[in-house]
Every structure is written in structure tokens, then in C-alpha cells.
Amino acid sequence: MYFRASNIMFAPIAPNGMDTETALPTYGTAVKIGSLNRISDNIDRVEASGYGDNARKVHVDEFRSYGLDVEITHIPRATYASLNGASVDTSSKDITFKDNDQAPYGGLVCVRGGRDDDDKDFYVGVYYPKLKSAMQGKDISTKGENITLVTEKLHFAGLACKNHVWCEESDEFATEAEAVTWCNTKLGVSSD
């Protein structure tokens, strides 16, 4: 069973690093987004049936795209701006969001972990090679009789690469460090 989520990182696709029929994208500098609370991926499929002679003769069910809903405990302001294509003022540090901001395509990795039926912990690296952030609304509330802790939310819209890959998962590792190393390799992060 899975009950751990950690080590979420994003790296923009490098100039001239787009995917091809035979290769996944290559990336620029990766950033840790923040402390991961949860990720939910939602696959969008297209489906159709064709009928003849009073029976279904053809059924087509194909992948179209996917979305990731991500919750983070806190996202550094500069990271949040860069994920969404916004600008940060160098002196005031204010973030300006414009209606024509363009979020970059990039790759995203994280680690999920759990415990198997033999009571042994395991960790799996997860890699989404081509997606981009889509702005979400904010939850803003006041302290009242109770305090409600609110995570920061991101939504990523993803596509399959030209070689049809939209997600990869590692084998199960015995340590989280091994899964992090696998994730770093996917984004081209050196082990230094």
C-alpha cells in the first residue's frame, strides 16, 4: 500500500530539447517545487463504438492527454512564478501575472512510497516527461473558531511525447535515496 509522497521537482524542456519519435525531452535546470502533500493524475481518454448488423463491431479507446492535480505545503515565490510563466520584480519581489503568460513545458518527477504485504518499505520514482502548469485559483480563509491548513495547489496539463510515453515509473527501491537518484537521472540532474 502506498502512503508516502515526496521529492517533487520540475525542469523546463531545454532549448532544442523537445521530444522526438525516438527520444524523450531533455531539460534545463530542475527546481524542487516544495514539500509534496499529494498528486492525483487524471487520464483523459477518447472512446467510440461502431455498430453494424445490430451489434457492436468496433470499440476504440485511446489515450488523449492527462492532468496532474498537485498539492504542496508551500511553493517558493520565484518557483511559483517560473512554473506559471509569470515575472518577478527584481527589487520588490512582487509577482506579476498577465493574461498572456506562457508556462513552459517541462518534466516532473516525484517519489511515492509504501509498504508491501511482507511489511517491507519500498519507494518508486515517477516521471512525467511533458507537461505544463495551468493556473489555479487560490483558497484564502481567515482563522476562526478553528484553524484550517490549506495546501497550495497546482494543475499540470500533460501530453504524451512523440514516442507515445506519458509516464514512467521505476522499479521498487529499498530506499528513498535510490528512487530520488532515479528521478534526478530522468531530469538530467547530476548527483553532485
Image (spheres, rainbow, N blue to C red):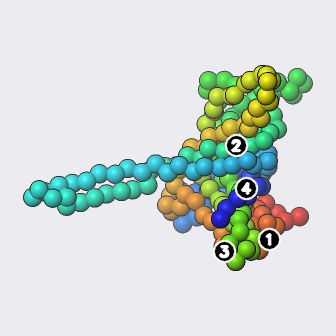
x%, y% of residue 30? 77, 52
Residue under numbered circle 3: 117
x%, y% of residue 100? 61, 26
SS assignment at label 4: strand
* Pointer 3 or 1: first along the chain: 3
Check whether the beta carbons of the residues at disc 1 and disc 2 lie within 8 A of each other: no
Q: Amino acid at mark 1?
A: Thr
Q: Is 98 drawn above or below residue 124 in the view shown?
A: above
Query: In the figure, is residue 107 to the left or right of 157?
Result: right
Residue under numbered circle 2: 71
Alpha carbons under labels 2 and 3: distance apart: 28 Å
Residue at 75%, 70% in the rendered image: 121
Residue under numbered circle 1: 175
Alpha carbons under labels 1 and 2: distance apart: 24 Å
Q: Amino acid at mark 3?
A: Asp
* Pointer 1 or 2: first along the chain: 2
Q: Which residue is more in the foreground, 83 or 119?
A: 119
Query: In the figure, is residue 128 to the left or right of 161?
Result: right
x%, y% of residue 152? 73, 37
Which image quadrant: the C terminus?
bottom right
Residue at 79%, 24% in the rendered image: 145
